[in-house]
Image (tube, rainbow, N blue to C red):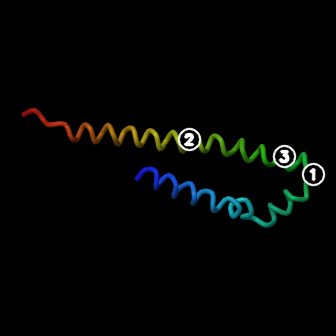
Amino acid sequence: MKIRAAILAACLFLSGARAFSQACSMCYSTARATSKDGQKAINRGVFVLLIPTLCFMTGGGWVALRYSRRRDLENNQPTKN
């Protein structure tokens, strides 16, 4: 089941790659009009802004998963009366 979910997520992520890069036609045409060095700088800037966001989202998902598992284990333990 996990493999199917991972394949589905990968397909959905990869299918929209071109659509996300051309969201704003004005930004696209301005970036396209710059020199090769300018285009490289824009690409690096996008990655610099993307990396912290991905780290925070991954870390937040990991923390939520970790604490939900801990909560489930605590709730499933038999109580002593």
Give the amino acid type for the residue marked by disc 3 in the picture.
Lys
- State if disc 2 and disc 1 touch (CB < 8 Å): no
> Counting other residues with Cα less than 10 Å from the Cα at mark 1, is it few (<14), some (14-19), or many (20 or more)?
few
Q: Residue at x 39, y 38 (%)?
A: 66
Q: CA distance from mark 1 to mark 3?
A: 9 Å
Q: Residue at x 21, y 41 (%)?
A: 76
In the rendering, at what x and y percent does residue 47 appear?
Answer: 72, 44
In the rendering, at what x and y percent does residue 75 appear?
Answer: 22, 41
Circle nearer the N terminus (1, 3): 1
In the rendering, at what x and y percent does residue 34 appear?
Answer: 91, 54
- State if disc 3 and disc 1 touch (CB < 8 Å): no
Q: CA distance from mark 2 to mark 3?
A: 25 Å
Q: Residue at x 28, y 42 (%)?
A: 72
Which residue bears the numbered disc 2? 56
Which residue bears the numbered disc 3? 40
Q: Secondary structure at mark 2?
A: helix
Q: Secondary structure at mark 3?
A: helix
Q: Secondary structure at mark 1?
A: loop
Numbered disc in front, either 2 or 3 = 3
In the rendering, at what x and y percent does residue 52 appear?
Answer: 63, 40
Locate the C terminus and report the quarter of the image it occupies: top left
Give the amino acid type for the residue marked by disc 1 in the picture.
Ser
> Counting other residues with Cα less than 10 Å from the Cα at mark 3, is it few (<14), some (14-19), or many (20 or more)?
few
Above-or-below relation of 12 to 50: below
Q: Residue at x 26, y 38 (%)?
A: 73
Q: CA distance from mark 1 to mark 2?
A: 33 Å
In the rendered view, does 49 fall on the left or right side of 30?
A: left
Numbered disc in front, either 1 or 2 = 1
Residue 35: mark in rendering:
1
Give the amino acid type for the residue marked by disc 2 in the picture.
Phe
Residue 72: mark in rendering:
none
